[in-house]
């Protein structure tokens, strides 16, 4: 494919949009080269990529075999479903979060502070925005791989109850976008490995308390309000609605939340990388 064709998606944008893209530090087609580099680096370590889906999968299997039998049926948005069906979409959202967060925090920190990959990339025609977009794209791909694997397991186990579940994969990718953007932006402010402990400190409570294992209605009102503004909760609500058939216009607010989080994180990451490496 010629360079002119590769640049076509950017050239057809109106001039004001191109100016806004540059001003916000967003990347362009050159970001694909960074994604290709990461894929090449993992060509002999594909097993490491596969292990990311195992943790939520083990939770799902243990719940289906054990807790699900004890709990039986639960009611959600007027639908009565098995407990395993209730928990499965939440674990799907968790899988997307894990895949996107791993690369956008721990791995990016190493590449930024020790591998000096981005210093080398900026010697090429790539910009800080290209690097940020490439990292988000790779994190999104990793989260997407985890989500596809988990959706296949859900389908085999009969945990999908609505045709709306066809939209579950795009939503899982949107969750990955949100956490990738947020993770890269946060990592750009970290200066030592100890700061990455904050990542675990944030992810574990979200996993446990974002209505993952029980409805939000079991919380006291004050705690429920806090839970409802967390990122993972947004994804769980949408995926649970899609897989259980509880679909309504209200889900669009959760989708908007994740989109703004991802794009906002991408903008901040591009500006921060430019500040750290070019000033």
Image: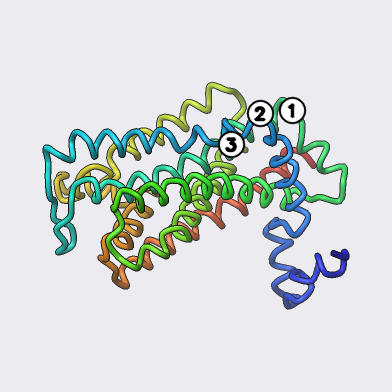
Residue 187 is tagged as: 3
Give the spatial CA distance, label 2 vs label 3. 10 Å
Q: Nearer the viewer, mark 3 or mark 1?
A: 1
Between discs 2 and 1, the one toward the N terminus: 2
Q: Nearer the viewer, mark 2 or mark 3?
A: 2
| Cβ atoms at labels 2 and 1 below 8 Å apart | yes
Near mark 1 (Cα within 10 A), the count class, few <14, some 14-19 or many ≥20, is: few
The residue that label 2 is drawn on is: 110
Q: Is 210 above or below relative to 65?
A: below
Describe the element under mark 1 as helix, strand or loop.
loop
Q: Is 214 above or below relative to 81?
A: above
Residue 115 is tagged as: 1
Is residue 222 something that shows in the picture? no
Near mark 3 (Cα within 10 A), the count class, few <14, some 14-19 or many ≥20, is: many
Q: What x and y, as percent, mark residue 187?
A: 58, 36
Give the spatial CA distance, label 2 vs label 1. 6 Å
């Amino acid at each position: 494919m010629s360079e002119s064709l590769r640049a076509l998606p950017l050239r057809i944008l109106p001039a004001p949009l191109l100016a806004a893209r540059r001003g916000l530090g967003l990347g362009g087609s050159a970001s694909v080269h960074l994604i290709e580099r990461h894929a090449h680096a993992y060509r002999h370590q594909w097993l490491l990529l596969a292990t990311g889906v195992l943790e939520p999968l083990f939770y799902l299997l243990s719940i289906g075999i054990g807790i699900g039998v004890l709990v039986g049926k639960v009611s959600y948005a007027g639908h009565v479903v098995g407990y395993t069906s209730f928990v499965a979409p939440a674990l799907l959202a968790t899988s997307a979060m894990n895949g996107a967060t791993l690369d956008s925090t721990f791995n990016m920190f190493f590449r930024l502070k020790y591998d000096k990959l981005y210093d080398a990339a900026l010697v090429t025609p790539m910009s800080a925005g290209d690097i940020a977009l490439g990292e988000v794209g790779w994190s999104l791909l990793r989260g997407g791989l985890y989500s596809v694997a988990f959706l296949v397991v859900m389908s085999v186990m009969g945990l999908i109850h609505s045709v709306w579940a066809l939209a579950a994969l795009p939503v899982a990718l949107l969750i990955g976008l949100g956490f990738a953007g947020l993770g890269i932006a946060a990592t750009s402010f970290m200066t030592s490995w100890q700061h990455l402990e904050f990542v675990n400190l944030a992810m574990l409570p979200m996993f446990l308390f974002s209505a993952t294992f029980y409805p939000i209605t079991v919380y006291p009102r004050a705690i429920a309000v806090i839970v409802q503004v967390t990122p993972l909760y947004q994804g769980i609500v949408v995926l649970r609605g899609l897989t259980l058939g509880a679909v309504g216009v209200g889900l669009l607010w959760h989708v908007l939340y994740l989109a703004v989080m991802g794009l906002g994180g991408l903008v901040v990451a591009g500006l921060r990388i430019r500040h750290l490496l070019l000033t």
